[in-house]
Image (tube, helix red, strand yellow):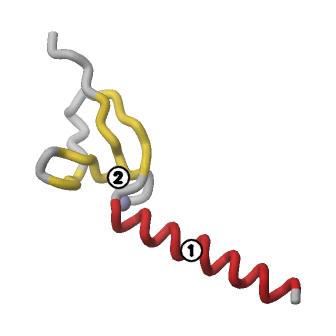
C-alpha cells in the first residue's frame, strides 16, 4: 500500500496540484483531497472580494 497522499484540488475548476503544475483531476486516483484554489482561481476570487468590498463601501457613503 502506498502512503496516502493529500493533494490540493481547486474547488473552482477542479484541477489538482501536481509536481508539474495544476492538472485536470483524474477521477481514478484514490487520494485524499484538500480543497483550495489554484493560482488563477485564487486571483479571480480575490478580485471578486475586492469588487464586493468596493461596492459595499460605495453603498455606505
Ligand atoms: Zn482553479
| Residue that mark 2 sits on | 14
- Mark 1 Cα within 10 Å, few/some/many (few <14, many 20+)? few
- Name the residue furthest left: 20
Provide residue 59's location: percent of width, then percent of height: 83, 86
Mark 2 lies within 8 Å of ligand 1 (Cβ measured): yes
- Name the residue furthest top: 1
Question: Which circle marks residue 32 in the picture?
Answer: none
Q: Is mark 2 on a helix, strand or loop?
A: loop
Left or right: residue 18 compared with residue 59: left
| Residue that mark 1 sits on | 48
Q: Is mark 1 on a helix, strand or loop?
A: helix
Q: Quadrant of the N terminus?
A: top left
Q: Is residue 59 above or below residue 12?
A: below
Q: In which quarter of the image is the C terminus?
A: bottom right
- Mark 2 Cα within 10 Å, few/some/many (few <14, many 20+)? some
Ligand 1: image quarter: bottom left
In this rendering, the label closer to the viewer, 1 or 2: 1
Left or right: residue 61 compared with residue 37: right
Left or right: residue 38 compared with residue 35: left
Provide residue 39's location: percent of width, then percent of height: 34, 62
Discs 1, 2 touching: Cβ within 8 Å: no
Upstream in sequence: badge 1 or badge 2: 2
Q: Nearer the viewer, residue 31 or 50?
A: 50
- Which residue sits at x=43%, y=70%? 43
Amino acid at each position: 500500500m502506498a502512503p496516502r497522499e493529500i493533494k490540493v484540488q481547486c474547488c473552482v475548476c477542479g484541477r489538482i496540484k501536481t509536481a508539474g503544475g495544476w492538472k485536470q483531476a483524474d477521477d481514478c486516483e484514490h487520494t485524499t483531497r484538500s480543497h483550495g484554489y489554484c493560482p488563477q482561481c485564487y486571483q479571480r476570487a480575490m478580485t471578486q472580494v475586492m469588487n464586493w468590498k468596493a461596492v459595499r463601501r460605495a453603498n455606505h457613503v
